[in-house]
Amino acid sequence: MSNCFLSVIVPVYNAESYLARCLDSILAQTFTDFEVILVDDGSTDGSAALCDSYAGKDGRFSCIHKKNGGHTSARQAGLKQASGTYIAFVDSDDWIAATMYQTMCGAAKDTGADMVCCNYTAVTPKGNLLCRSTFPEGLYEKPLLEEQVYPRMLYSGSYFTYGEAPNLWNKLFRRELLNKNLPSVPLSVKLGEDALVTYICLLESSRVYFCEEPFYYYQSSSSSLTHNMDENRLSENRTLFDAFLSIVDLSVYPCMERQLDTYFVYQCLLTYGPVFSGIPTPRGRRMFLDECAYPPVKRAFRAVRIRELKGLHNKLYALCIRHRLYRLFRFLLSH
Protein backbone atom coordinates (compact mmCIF):
# COMPACT_ATOMS: atom_id res chain seq x y z
CA MET A 1 0.00 0.00 0.00
CA SER A 2 1.23 3.52 -0.75
CA ASN A 3 1.91 5.98 2.03
CA CYS A 4 -1.13 6.95 4.09
CA PHE A 5 -1.75 9.31 6.96
CA LEU A 6 -2.30 6.62 9.61
CA SER A 7 -1.07 3.08 10.17
CA VAL A 8 -3.08 1.03 12.66
CA ILE A 9 -1.17 -1.92 14.11
CA VAL A 10 -3.19 -4.77 15.66
CA PRO A 11 -1.23 -7.53 17.46
CA VAL A 12 -3.23 -10.78 17.34
CA TYR A 13 -2.76 -13.96 19.33
CA ASN A 14 -5.57 -16.51 19.74
CA ALA A 15 -8.19 -13.77 19.56
CA GLU A 16 -10.73 -15.58 17.37
CA SER A 17 -13.71 -14.94 19.64
CA TYR A 18 -13.43 -11.15 19.69
CA LEU A 19 -11.21 -10.19 16.74
CA ALA A 20 -14.11 -9.47 14.36
CA ARG A 21 -15.57 -6.92 16.79
CA CYS A 22 -12.21 -5.17 16.95
CA LEU A 23 -11.62 -5.11 13.18
CA ASP A 24 -15.19 -4.14 12.36
CA SER A 25 -14.82 -1.09 14.61
CA ILE A 26 -11.77 -0.06 12.60
CA LEU A 27 -13.62 -0.62 9.33
CA ALA A 28 -16.43 1.61 10.63
CA GLN A 29 -14.13 4.64 10.99
CA THR A 30 -15.39 7.83 9.39
CA PHE A 31 -11.74 8.64 8.66
CA THR A 32 -10.52 6.56 5.72
CA ASP A 33 -6.88 7.46 4.98
CA PHE A 34 -5.39 4.57 6.93
CA GLU A 35 -3.87 1.12 6.60
CA VAL A 36 -4.32 -1.73 9.06
CA ILE A 37 -1.42 -4.08 9.76
CA LEU A 38 -2.57 -7.28 11.44
CA VAL A 39 0.27 -9.11 13.15
CA ASP A 40 -0.64 -12.75 13.76
CA ASP A 41 1.79 -13.65 16.53
CA GLY A 42 1.75 -17.41 16.05
CA SER A 43 -1.95 -17.98 16.80
CA THR A 44 -3.09 -21.57 17.19
CA ASP A 45 -6.82 -20.94 16.82
CA GLY A 46 -8.73 -19.46 13.88
CA SER A 47 -7.24 -15.97 14.26
CA ALA A 48 -4.77 -16.34 11.40
CA ALA A 49 -7.49 -17.29 8.93
CA LEU A 50 -9.67 -14.42 10.14
CA CYS A 51 -6.80 -11.98 9.62
CA ASP A 52 -6.32 -13.29 6.07
CA SER A 53 -10.04 -12.95 5.45
CA TYR A 54 -10.08 -9.26 6.37
CA ALA A 55 -6.93 -8.66 4.33
CA GLY A 56 -8.65 -10.29 1.34
CA LYS A 57 -11.78 -8.15 1.65
CA ASP A 58 -10.23 -4.69 2.10
CA GLY A 59 -7.08 -3.46 0.38
CA ARG A 60 -6.19 -1.30 3.37
CA PHE A 61 -5.66 -4.44 5.47
CA SER A 62 -2.49 -6.52 5.35
CA CYS A 63 -1.37 -9.40 7.51
CA ILE A 64 1.96 -10.55 8.91
CA HIS A 65 2.26 -14.13 10.18
CA LYS A 66 5.15 -14.71 12.57
CA LYS A 67 6.29 -17.05 15.31
CA ASN A 68 4.98 -16.20 18.75
CA GLY A 69 7.17 -13.58 20.34
CA GLY A 70 4.88 -11.55 22.56
CA HIS A 71 3.04 -8.26 22.34
CA THR A 72 6.07 -6.00 21.96
CA SER A 73 7.55 -8.26 19.29
CA ALA A 74 4.28 -8.08 17.34
CA ARG A 75 4.14 -4.30 17.59
CA GLN A 76 7.74 -3.99 16.45
CA ALA A 77 7.03 -6.23 13.45
CA GLY A 78 4.02 -4.12 12.51
CA LEU A 79 5.97 -0.88 12.82
CA LYS A 80 8.60 -2.13 10.35
CA GLN A 81 5.89 -2.46 7.71
CA ALA A 82 4.00 0.74 8.54
CA SER A 83 3.94 3.58 6.00
CA GLY A 84 1.75 6.08 7.85
CA THR A 85 2.79 9.52 8.99
CA TYR A 86 1.23 8.58 12.32
CA ILE A 87 0.94 5.23 14.08
CA ALA A 88 -1.90 3.90 16.23
CA PHE A 89 -2.38 0.60 18.04
CA VAL A 90 -5.51 -1.39 18.82
CA ASP A 91 -5.43 -4.52 20.97
CA SER A 92 -7.36 -7.42 19.49
CA ASP A 93 -9.87 -7.74 22.35
CA ASP A 94 -10.74 -4.02 22.33
CA TRP A 95 -12.71 -1.76 19.99
CA ILE A 96 -12.90 1.92 19.05
CA ALA A 97 -15.58 4.55 18.43
CA ALA A 98 -16.36 5.31 14.79
CA THR A 99 -15.11 8.92 14.99
CA MET A 100 -11.90 8.19 16.89
CA TYR A 101 -9.43 8.61 14.06
CA GLN A 102 -11.33 11.41 12.33
CA THR A 103 -11.06 13.49 15.49
CA MET A 104 -7.53 12.50 16.48
CA CYS A 105 -6.03 12.67 12.99
CA GLY A 106 -7.81 15.99 12.50
CA ALA A 107 -6.13 17.30 15.64
CA ALA A 108 -2.77 16.03 14.38
CA LYS A 109 -3.24 17.74 11.01
CA ASP A 110 -4.46 21.01 12.50
CA THR A 111 -1.79 21.34 15.19
CA GLY A 112 1.21 19.38 13.92
CA ALA A 113 1.28 17.51 17.24
CA ASP A 114 3.82 14.73 17.67
CA MET A 115 1.31 12.84 19.81
CA VAL A 116 -2.46 12.93 20.21
CA CYS A 117 -4.01 11.30 23.30
CA CYS A 118 -7.65 10.56 24.13
CA ASN A 119 -9.53 9.23 27.13
CA TYR A 120 -10.91 5.70 27.21
CA THR A 121 -13.60 3.49 28.71
CA ALA A 122 -12.63 0.40 30.70
CA VAL A 123 -15.26 -2.31 30.13
CA THR A 124 -15.44 -4.39 33.33
CA PRO A 125 -17.80 -7.08 34.65
CA LYS A 126 -19.23 -4.45 37.01
CA GLY A 127 -19.88 -1.95 34.22
CA ASN A 128 -18.09 0.68 32.20
CA LEU A 129 -15.54 2.94 33.86
CA LEU A 130 -14.55 6.23 32.25
CA CYS A 131 -10.78 6.77 32.52
CA ARG A 132 -9.67 10.38 32.12
CA SER A 133 -6.30 12.04 31.77
CA THR A 134 -5.53 14.68 34.38
CA PHE A 135 -4.70 17.12 31.58
CA PRO A 136 -7.53 19.23 30.11
CA GLU A 137 -8.23 19.10 26.38
CA GLY A 138 -6.01 21.22 24.18
CA LEU A 139 -2.60 21.66 22.58
CA TYR A 140 0.46 21.62 24.83
CA GLU A 141 3.61 23.03 23.26
CA LYS A 142 7.04 22.45 24.82
CA PRO A 143 6.94 25.18 27.51
CA LEU A 144 3.51 23.98 28.65
CA LEU A 145 4.59 20.34 28.51
CA GLU A 146 7.56 21.15 30.75
CA GLU A 147 5.45 23.19 33.14
CA GLN A 148 2.26 21.15 33.41
CA VAL A 149 2.65 17.68 31.89
CA TYR A 150 6.14 16.34 32.60
CA PRO A 151 6.06 16.92 36.40
CA ARG A 152 3.03 14.63 36.84
CA MET A 153 2.51 12.57 33.70
CA LEU A 154 3.73 9.28 35.20
CA TYR A 155 2.59 9.90 38.77
CA SER A 156 -0.15 12.45 39.38
CA GLY A 157 0.62 12.84 43.09
CA SER A 158 -2.13 10.51 44.35
CA TYR A 159 -1.03 6.89 44.95
CA PHE A 160 -1.25 5.37 42.47
CA THR A 161 -2.75 7.40 39.67
CA TYR A 162 -1.12 8.15 36.34
CA GLY A 163 -1.23 11.73 35.10
CA GLU A 164 -1.53 10.31 31.60
CA ALA A 165 -2.18 6.58 31.20
CA PRO A 166 0.81 4.65 29.80
CA ASN A 167 -1.25 2.74 27.23
CA LEU A 168 -0.18 2.97 23.59
CA TRP A 169 -3.64 2.22 22.23
CA ASN A 170 -5.35 5.52 23.12
CA LYS A 171 -2.72 7.58 21.34
CA LEU A 172 -1.39 8.59 17.93
CA PHE A 173 2.39 8.81 17.56
CA ARG A 174 4.39 10.47 14.85
CA ARG A 175 6.13 7.54 13.22
CA GLU A 176 9.65 8.91 13.77
CA LEU A 177 9.04 8.93 17.53
CA LEU A 178 8.12 5.26 17.56
CA ASN A 179 10.90 4.28 15.16
CA LYS A 180 13.33 5.68 17.72
CA ASN A 181 11.76 4.27 20.88
CA LEU A 182 9.67 1.14 20.26
CA PRO A 183 12.53 -1.07 18.95
CA SER A 184 14.52 -0.47 22.14
CA VAL A 185 11.86 -2.00 24.43
CA PRO A 186 13.24 -5.29 25.85
CA LEU A 187 11.12 -8.23 24.70
CA SER A 188 11.40 -9.77 28.17
CA VAL A 189 9.26 -7.01 29.70
CA LYS A 190 5.63 -8.17 29.72
CA LEU A 191 4.13 -5.59 32.12
CA GLY A 192 5.12 -1.95 31.91
CA GLU A 193 6.32 -2.07 28.32
CA ASP A 194 3.80 0.58 27.25
CA ALA A 195 5.14 2.99 29.86
CA LEU A 196 8.65 2.69 28.46
CA VAL A 197 7.41 3.95 25.11
CA THR A 198 4.70 6.45 26.07
CA TYR A 199 6.58 8.56 28.60
CA ILE A 200 9.80 8.70 26.59
CA CYS A 201 7.83 9.78 23.52
CA LEU A 202 6.08 12.46 25.59
CA LEU A 203 9.44 13.77 26.79
CA GLU A 204 10.72 13.91 23.20
CA SER A 205 7.58 15.56 21.77
CA SER A 206 7.52 19.24 20.86
CA ARG A 207 3.74 19.44 21.01
CA VAL A 208 1.03 17.09 22.29
CA TYR A 209 -2.72 17.33 21.87
CA PHE A 210 -5.09 15.91 24.51
CA CYS A 211 -8.65 14.99 23.46
CA GLU A 212 -11.39 14.81 26.05
CA GLU A 213 -13.56 12.18 24.31
CA PRO A 214 -13.25 8.54 25.45
CA PHE A 215 -12.91 6.99 22.00
CA TYR A 216 -11.26 3.71 23.00
CA TYR A 217 -12.97 0.75 24.68
CA TYR A 218 -10.60 -1.38 26.73
CA GLN A 219 -11.89 -4.88 27.47
CA SER A 220 -10.18 -6.66 30.31
CA SER A 221 -9.98 -10.37 29.52
CA SER A 222 -8.05 -13.49 30.37
CA SER A 223 -6.25 -13.50 27.03
CA SER A 224 -2.78 -14.76 26.31
CA LEU A 225 -1.49 -11.23 26.71
CA THR A 226 -2.19 -11.45 30.44
CA HIS A 227 1.05 -12.24 32.23
CA ASN A 228 1.11 -14.48 35.28
CA MET A 229 2.94 -13.28 38.37
CA ASP A 230 5.73 -15.86 38.55
CA GLU A 231 9.42 -15.59 39.45
CA ASN A 232 10.23 -14.16 36.02
CA ARG A 233 8.41 -11.01 37.06
CA LEU A 234 11.34 -10.11 39.35
CA SER A 235 13.83 -10.04 36.49
CA GLU A 236 11.29 -8.23 34.33
CA ASN A 237 10.99 -5.55 37.02
CA ARG A 238 14.74 -5.11 36.99
CA THR A 239 14.85 -4.90 33.22
CA LEU A 240 12.04 -2.33 33.22
CA PHE A 241 13.64 -0.19 35.95
CA ASP A 242 17.09 -0.34 34.34
CA ALA A 243 15.62 0.59 30.96
CA PHE A 244 13.88 3.64 32.40
CA LEU A 245 17.02 4.81 34.20
CA SER A 246 19.15 4.33 31.09
CA ILE A 247 16.75 6.24 28.83
CA VAL A 248 15.55 9.09 31.04
CA ASP A 249 18.27 11.66 31.72
CA LEU A 250 17.42 12.85 35.22
CA SER A 251 19.84 15.76 34.89
CA VAL A 252 17.67 17.04 32.02
CA TYR A 253 14.34 15.99 33.52
CA PRO A 254 14.79 16.11 37.33
CA CYS A 255 11.00 16.11 37.70
CA MET A 256 11.05 12.45 36.63
CA GLU A 257 13.09 11.22 39.61
CA ARG A 258 10.29 11.21 42.18
CA GLN A 259 7.82 9.92 39.61
CA LEU A 260 10.08 7.00 38.72
CA ASP A 261 10.77 6.18 42.37
CA THR A 262 7.04 6.07 43.09
CA TYR A 263 6.38 4.05 39.93
CA PHE A 264 9.06 1.51 40.90
CA VAL A 265 7.52 1.18 44.37
CA TYR A 266 4.10 0.70 42.77
CA GLN A 267 5.38 -2.03 40.45
CA CYS A 268 7.12 -3.84 43.30
CA LEU A 269 4.10 -3.69 45.60
CA LEU A 270 1.94 -4.88 42.72
CA THR A 271 4.08 -7.95 42.10
CA TYR A 272 6.07 -8.98 45.18
CA GLY A 273 3.06 -10.39 47.05
CA PRO A 274 1.85 -12.72 44.29
CA VAL A 275 5.41 -13.73 43.37
CA PHE A 276 6.81 -14.44 46.83
CA SER A 277 3.69 -16.20 48.05
CA GLY A 278 4.65 -19.01 45.67
CA ILE A 279 8.33 -19.21 46.68
CA PRO A 280 9.10 -21.23 49.84
CA THR A 281 11.65 -20.28 52.48
CA PRO A 282 14.70 -20.31 52.55
CA ARG A 283 14.98 -19.63 48.83
CA GLY A 284 12.29 -16.99 49.12
CA ARG A 285 14.25 -15.22 51.83
CA ARG A 286 17.41 -15.07 49.72
CA MET A 287 15.50 -13.76 46.72
CA PHE A 288 13.59 -11.21 48.82
CA LEU A 289 16.80 -9.83 50.32
CA ASP A 290 18.36 -9.67 46.85
CA GLU A 291 15.43 -7.64 45.55
CA CYS A 292 15.50 -5.30 48.55
CA ALA A 293 19.20 -4.63 47.93
CA TYR A 294 18.82 -4.01 44.19
CA PRO A 295 19.89 -0.34 43.80
CA PRO A 296 16.80 1.07 41.99
CA VAL A 297 14.50 -0.77 44.42
CA LYS A 298 16.52 0.18 47.50
CA ARG A 299 16.66 3.84 46.47
CA ALA A 300 12.95 4.00 45.56
CA PHE A 301 11.74 2.54 48.86
CA ARG A 302 13.99 4.90 50.81
CA ALA A 303 12.84 7.93 48.80
CA VAL A 304 9.07 7.39 48.83
CA ARG A 305 7.17 8.42 51.96
CA ILE A 306 5.36 5.37 53.30
CA ARG A 307 2.50 7.50 54.63
CA GLU A 308 1.69 8.54 51.05
CA LEU A 309 0.90 4.96 50.06
CA LYS A 310 -2.72 3.81 50.13
CA GLY A 311 -3.76 0.73 52.07
CA LEU A 312 -2.37 -0.66 55.31
CA HIS A 313 -0.90 -3.73 53.62
CA ASN A 314 0.95 -1.58 51.08
CA LYS A 315 2.43 0.51 53.87
CA LEU A 316 3.51 -2.56 55.82
CA TYR A 317 4.93 -4.25 52.71
CA ALA A 318 6.90 -1.09 51.94
CA LEU A 319 8.25 -1.03 55.50
CA CYS A 320 9.35 -4.65 55.13
CA ILE A 321 11.09 -3.98 51.82
CA ARG A 322 12.80 -0.82 53.06
CA HIS A 323 14.17 -2.57 56.18
CA ARG A 324 14.53 -6.07 54.66
CA LEU A 325 12.11 -7.67 57.14
CA TYR A 326 11.44 -11.00 55.48
CA ARG A 327 9.72 -12.72 58.41
CA LEU A 328 7.18 -9.93 58.80
CA PHE A 329 6.70 -9.87 55.03
CA ARG A 330 5.91 -13.62 54.99
CA PHE A 331 3.53 -13.15 57.92
CA LEU A 332 1.68 -10.40 56.07
CA LEU A 333 1.38 -12.56 52.93
CA SER A 334 -0.68 -15.08 54.89
CA HIS A 335 -2.95 -12.54 56.58
Image (tube, rainbow, N blue to C red):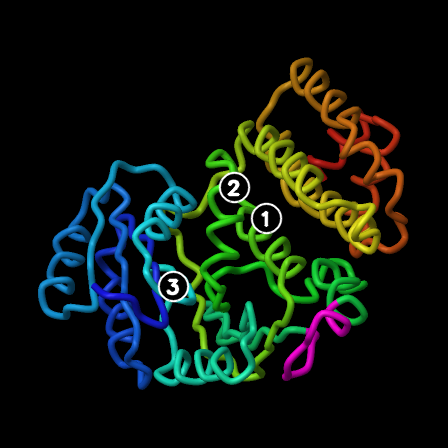
How much space separates mark 3 and mark 2, taking CA atoms? Answer: 18 Å
Q: Name the residue beneath numbered marker 1.
A: 196
Q: Name the residue beneath numbered marker 2.
A: 185
Horizontal arrangement in the rendering, residue 77 relative to residue 194 (left or right): left
Q: Where 312 sits versus 140, above or below?
A: above
In magenta segment, residue 139: yes
How much space separates mark 3 and mark 1, taking CA atoms? Answer: 18 Å
Q: Which residues are magenta?
A: 134-145
* Type of amino acid under label 3: Val
- Residue most toward the top? 282
Q: Where 5 sits versus 331, above or below?
A: below
Residue 132: image x %, image y %? 62, 75
Q: Is residue 313 visible?
A: no
Depth check, mark 3 against mark 1: the one in front is 1
Horizontal arrangement in the rendering, residue 127 relative to residue 82 (left or right): right
Q: Depth check: 222 or 8 in front?
A: 8
The residue at the point 30 percent across, 37 percent down is: 68
Residue 45: image x %, image y %? 18, 47
Q: Depth check: 131 or 104 in front?
A: 104
Horizontal arrangement in the rendering, residue 62 relative to residue 229 (left or right): left
